[in-house]
Every structure is written in C-alpha cells, then in structure tokens.
C-alpha cells in the first residue's frame, strides 16, 4: 500500500489493486474497478466546481478510500479487518458466473460501513448537516457510471462480456439501485455516529459492522434466486429492494 494523501494517491493505489487482480485473475478486482471509476468522477467534479466545498470533498474521498485500501492490503497480509470486509474478501473467491454478488458485498462493506465513518470523522467539531448537499451529489455521479464500469469489469474478466449479452441491462439496474440505496443508509449512519460520544464511538461501529456482515451474507446468498435466466430480474429486484 502506497501513502494516501490526495485523490491522485487513491487512484494510484486502486490501479495497483486492479493490476494485482489481473495478474492473479482475482475477483477482488471487480470492486476496485467500480470504485476507481467513481473516484475519477469525484475528482473531475471537484476540479469542475461541482461540489459545494471541493477541499472538504477531497478529504472525505481520501479518508473514505483509505478504509477500503487499507482493508484490502491488510487482508492480503492475513491481518485483521472488519467483519464486513472479511466476508466481502472471502466470498469473492467463491466462483459464481454473476458479478453482481461480488459488487453488492463490496458495496455493502465500503458504503454502509466505511462511508458513514469517514463522513463522521471529517465532521468532528462541525455540523455534519453542512455536508449533506455534497453527499447527495455523489448519487448523481453514480447514476452515470454503469456502462463505463461494465467496460472495466470486462477487461478484468472477459467472461463478463457474455453475461452482459445474456442479461442485458439487468445488472445495470441492480448496481445503480443498490449503490444509491446504500448511500442513503450511510448518511443516516453518519449522522448517528456524529452524535455518538467518544466513549461509545468504537462500540457503535462494531455494532454496525456486525449488522453489515449479516446483510452481506444475505446479498451473496441472493444468487440462489438470481441464477436462472427466467425470473432473474424480478427475483433479484425483490430481494434487494426489500432490504
């Protein structure tokens, strides 16, 4: 893991993870490819003045990204990581020809846990509600990413091209829908954490982590309802939206 102080540093580390994944044919690269595209769009948004406070958004991005990147390299070194990331990394090694499960588990770990922590941390001593406008703008960025993400995933795993031909835009809907839903939950968690005392701060994170672990298992096991051509769209949509 290389030092991370700026968004450029985040992108460099994500490139390293993607390169490692390509070399090892490792499914962990799926999430890194998705996250890299999000990070680049956030960077472009900052440069274009899209966010209310560009410096604050870069700080959020860096603190946020560090949690994922540190977890990734810690896992490779067999060091302790949060339960949310542990299960995300472990299930990625269980082959299944539907990429969406790998992405959903990674999204659940990073957004439903890490994003709320990062938002609360950079808002210490401040009114976290001042961050809400820029937090919401991230959703606008996410909605434009699916086609580009598919290209990245196809480069990591060529078989994904065949899956796209088979299922069409179904994965598009699920990725976009699930990420937006996760971000909304992350904001509520961030507000709760911002109002939590220092004495119970870590305990609150542990509780959230355990809850995320259970949801990650649910997302991954949803493959049982998503494995056939017939009913794929409706079954996946119902199981994910009901969370």
Image (tube, helix red, strand yellow):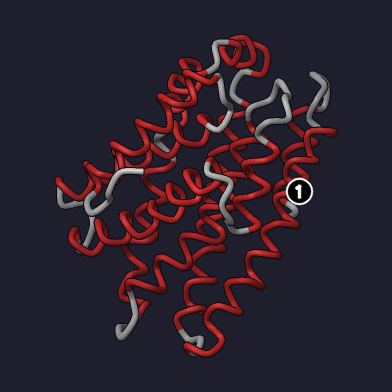
- In the picture, the quarter occupied by the N terminus is top left
The 10 Å Cα crowd at callout 1, few under 14, some 14 to 19, many 20 or more, is some
Q: How many marks?
A: 1
Q: What's the residue at 56%, 59% (across, down)?
A: 112
- The residue that label 1 is drawn on is 217
* Nearer to us in this view, 71 or 33: 71
Which quarter of the figure has residue 118?
A: bottom left
Q: Give the vertical position of 143 relative to 182 (above or below).
A: above
Q: Give the vertical position of 93 relative to 135 (above or below).
A: above
Q: In this view, does 220 lie to the left or right of 149?
A: right
- In the picture, the quarter occupied by the C terminus is bottom right
Which quarter of the figure has residue 9?
A: top left
Percent x, y for residue 67? 44, 56
Percent x, y for residue 135? 37, 61
SS state under label 1: helix
Percent x, y for residue 185? 56, 63
Which quarter of the figure has residue 52?
A: bottom left
Q: What's the residue at 36%, 77% (across, down)?
A: 128
């Amino acid at each position: 893991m290389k030092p991370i102080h700026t968004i450029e540093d985040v992108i460099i580390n994500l490139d390293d993870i993607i390169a490692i994944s390509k070399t090892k044919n490792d499914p962990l690269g799926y999430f890194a490819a998705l996250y890299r595209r999000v990070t680049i769009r956030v960077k472009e948004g900052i440069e274009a003045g899209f966010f209310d406070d560009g410096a604050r958004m870069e700080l959020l991005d860096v603190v946020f990204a560090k949690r994922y990147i540190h977890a990734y390299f810690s896992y490779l070194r067999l060091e302790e990581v949060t339960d949310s990331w542990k299960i995300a990394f472990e299930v990625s090694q269980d082959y299944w020809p539907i990429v969406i499960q790998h992405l959903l588990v990674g999204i659940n770990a990073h957004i439903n846990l890490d994003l709320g922590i990062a938002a609360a941390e950079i808002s210490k001593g401040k009114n976290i509600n001042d961050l809400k406008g820029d937090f919401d703008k991230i959703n606008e960025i996410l909605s434009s990413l699916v086609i580009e993400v598919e290209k990245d995933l196809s480069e990591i795993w060529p078989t994904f091209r065949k899956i796209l031909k088979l299922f069409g835009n179904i994965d598009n809907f699920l990725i976009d829908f699930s990420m937006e839903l996760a971000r909304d939950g992350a904001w509520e968690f961030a507000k709760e954490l911002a109002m939590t005392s220092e004495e119970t701060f870590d305990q609150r994170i542990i509780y959230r982590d355990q809850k995320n672990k259970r949801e990650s298992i649910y997302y991954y096991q949803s493959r049982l309802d998503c494995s056939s051509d017939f009913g794929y769209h409706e079954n996946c949509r119902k199981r994910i939206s009901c969370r």
